[in-house]
Image (spheres, rainbow, N blue to C red):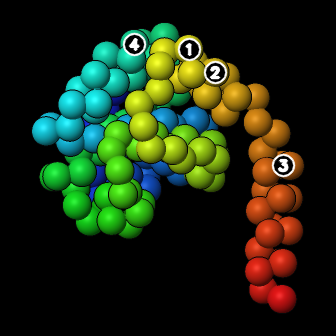
Amino acid sequence: MATQTLTEQNFDEVVTGNDVVLVDFWAEWCGPCKSFAPTFEASSEKHADVVHGKVDTEAQQGLAAAANIRSIPTIMAFREGVLVFAQPGALPPAALEDLVTQVKELDMDEVRKQLAEQQAGADQ
């Protein structure tokens, strides 16, 4: 499955409507972004069950600001609508493959439990 363009209009729908979503925040002028693009595209071809989305931070400045993007490329991974990974910097192919595997294997009941515990601690 090829990568798809994410915008302010479709971002939430794509993230909440799919089990696993990887998002690449990038810009046309960014050298490391261009270098990472083939790796991200290859991952999208290998993992048809994972949505691979790209956000052009120049065209989608509001979305980039809402996601608190400070450096590009930044890779985010969502599982069942929950942000489970966010890291600036291009990943080498093996690291991206490892990330996809780890996100797929997450126990989301445990993740939600930990998030609830963190929220409860923050509320005190």
Left or right of 9 on screen, residue 107: right
Question: At label 3, which amino acid type do we have?
Answer: Asp
The numbered mark at residue 94 is: 1
Mark in front: 2 vs 4:
2
Q: Which tag, 4 or 3, sits closer to the chain's start?
A: 4
Assign the C terminus to one quadrant of the image: bottom right
Q: Secondary structure at mark 4?
A: helix
Q: Are marks 2 and 1 in contact (CB under 8 Å)?
A: yes
How far is mark 2 from mark 4, CA to CA? 14 Å
Residue 89 position within the rendered picture, expressed as x and y whole percent measured from the top left: 42, 37
Q: Secondary structure at mark 3?
A: helix
Residue for point 77% across, 74% down: 119
Mark in front: 4 vs 1:
1
- Nearer-the-camera pick, 74 or 116: 74
Q: Residues within 10 Å of mark 2 (few under 14, many from 20)?
A: few
The numbered mark at residue 42 is: 4
Q: Are marks 1 and 3 in contact (CB under 8 Å)?
A: no
Mark in front: 1 vs 3:
1
Q: Which tag, 1 or 3, sits closer to the chain's start?
A: 1
Q: For residue 49, say whether it is visible.
A: no
Q: How many marks?
A: 4
How far is mark 2 from mark 3, CA to CA? 21 Å
Q: Are marks 4 and 3 in contact (CB under 8 Å)?
A: no
Q: Quadrant for residue 28, please give it.
A: top left
Q: Secondary structure at mark 1?
A: helix
Q: Residues within 10 Å of mark 3 (few under 14, many from 20)?
A: few
Mark in front: 2 vs 3:
2
